Amino acid sequence: MQKLTRIVTLSAALLMASGCSYFGVYKRDIPQGNLVTAEMVNQLQPGMTRDDVVHVMGRPLLEAPFDANEWDYVFYLDEAYEGVERRRVTLTFDGNRLMDIQREGELDEEIELSPVEGVGPQVEGASAQPTQGSVSRDDGDL
C-alpha cells in the first residue's frame, strides 16, 4: 500500500511539474512587416511617383506578383498577452503614378516597439568594442 501511495504521489508531482507549471510561460511581442502610421499615409497624394512613395513609406513588403501596379504595406503585431494588431495599406499605381490608397486597421493608434536587450545582433555603432579602424596597439620592443 505504501508503494502504491508513493507511485501515485510521484506521478502527480511529475504531472504538475511537466505540463501544468505554476510559473507562467514568458511571452514577448512579435512585430512583423512594415510599420505603417497615419502620419506616413497622410503624406501620400494621388499622382506621386513610385520613388516619392518609397521616400515616404519605404519599400513595400509585398508587390503583387501578377500585377506590378499594386503595393502592399502589411504590419502585424502579435502582442504577447493581448490580441493581434493588424494594419495594411494597399497602393495602386497607373504606370509610375499613385492612383489609389486603401487602408485597413487602426493607423491612428500609437504602437510602441521596445527593443529586447541582449537578444540578437548588436545595432551597428552601439557596440562597446573598438572598431577595426580605431584599434591601437603597442607593439613595444621586440
Image: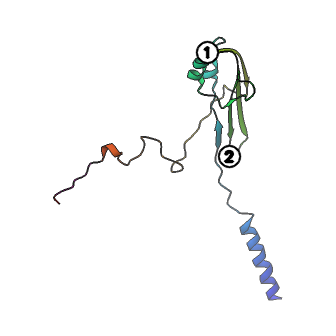
* Mark 2 Cα-neighbour bin, 10 Å: few <14, some 14–19, many ≥20: few
Instruction: Report the residue that reaches farthest toward the left.
Output: 141
Amino acid under disc 2: Ala
In this view, the residue in front, 68 or 28, is: 68
The circle drawn on residue 65 is none
Magenta highlight on residue 134:
no
Query: Of circles 2 and 1, which is in front?
Result: 1
Q: Quadrant of residue 50?
A: top right
In this view, the residue in front, 77 or 21, is: 77
Q: Marks 2/1: CA distance? A: 38 Å
Magenta highlight on residue 139:
yes
Residue 60: horizontal and vertical position, in percent?
Answer: 64, 28
Which image quadrant: the C terminus? bottom left
Q: Is residue 112 left or right of residue 83?
A: left
Amino acid under disc 1: Thr
Residue 94: horizontal and vertical position, in percent?
Answer: 70, 14
Q: Quadrant of residue 33?
A: top right
Dominant SS in magenta: loop
Decide: is 25 above or below 87. Answer: below
Residue 72: horizontal and vertical position, in percent?
Answer: 70, 27
Q: Which residue is mark 2?
A: 80
Query: What residue is rendered at 62% in x and 33% in y?
Result: 111
Decide: is 38 above or below 80. Answer: above
Decide: is 45 above or below 37. Answer: above
* Mark 1 Cα-neighbour bin, 10 Å: few <14, some 14–19, many ≥20: some
Q: Is residue 119 left or right of residue 13?
A: left
Mark 1, secondary structure of its residue: loop
Query: What residue is rendered at 54% in x and 50% in y?
Result: 119
Q: Which residue is mark 1?
A: 49
Residue 1: horizontal and vertical position, in percent?
Answer: 83, 88
- Residue extent of the magenta highlight: 136-140
